[in-house]
Amino acid sequence: MAILKIVTLSDPILRVKCTPVAHIDKKMIKVAEDMVETMYAAPGVGLAANQVGLNFQLAVVDATRDPEKYGKNPIILFNPKILELSGKKTNEEGCLSIPGLFEEVTRAAKVKATYTDQNGKEQIVETDGLLAQALQHEIDHLNGKLYIDHLSSIKRNLIKKKFKKYRTHEAE
Ligand code: ZN
């Protein structure tokens, strides 16, 4: 397996609506496995394909609070779609493409979603908690949307500004 490079905020691929995956072949599964590896190495709760520069509908998540301690439980999702959203919950959220910054985001508390797994089987997941938050975050990514889009324009601009500053310092 390989660790992939994660693109950041300024990369236009994060704003692309990703293409559905028609065939889940060996090559696709290898990419998914590399994404899982990259997610754990970051470390993060989820990763979407466009975050590693690939514009197709593939995301990986593991909402286990501490995978090193409690065991890894990665979910590979091809062509995931939200079926139902209900309730509201505000949680702190971050993104591997906007490293080091966090904001409170209000999303649905419960999610019902469908996806195709690595065996080509249709799956339905109904969940709440961190997994519900992660699924909404990753499916947003595949639609070219970032968590900062859920914030007020003042907060969003502040994040962009902070991110720019962070990048400049990193380059020094
Ligand atoms: Zn993200």
Image (cartoon, grey):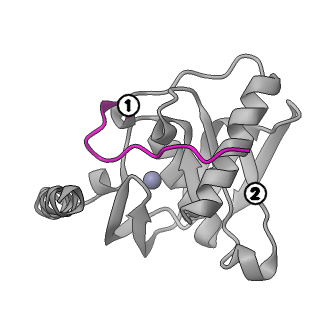
Residue in view at x 17 percent, y 63 percent: 169
- Residue 127: % across, % down: 69, 63
Alpha-carbon neighbours of circle 2 within 10 Å: few (<14), some, or many (≥20)?
some
Position of residue 115 in the picture relative to residue 85 (left or right): right
* Front-lying residue, 159 or 128: 159
Total marks placed: 2
SS under mark 1: helix
Q: Is residue 60 left or right of residue 119?
A: left
Residue at far bottom of view: 69
**Which numbered circle lies on residue 74?**
2
Image quarter where the N terminus lies is: top right
- What residue appears at the point 30 percent right and 31 percent down from the top-left corner? 12
* Amino acid identity at mark 1: Ile
Magenta-colored segment: predominant secondary structure? loop
**Which region of the structure is painted magenta?**
1-13
On the image, numbered disc 1 is attached to which residue? Answer: 13
Q: Residue at x 81, y 42 (%)?
A: 123
Res. 31 image quadrant: top right
Q: What's the distance in space between the residues labelled 1 and 2, CA to CA?
A: 24 Å
Q: Position of residue 129 (x, y in %)?
A: 61, 72
- Position of residue 159 measured from the top left corner of the image (x, y, whole percent): 20, 62
Q: Nearer the viewer, residue 104 or 46?
A: 46
Sequence order check, earlier mark of 1 and 2: 1
| Image-quadrant location for residue 65 | bottom right
Q: Neighbour class for label 1 at 10 Å: few (<14), some, many (≥20)? A: many
Of 21 and 90, the residue lying toward us: 21
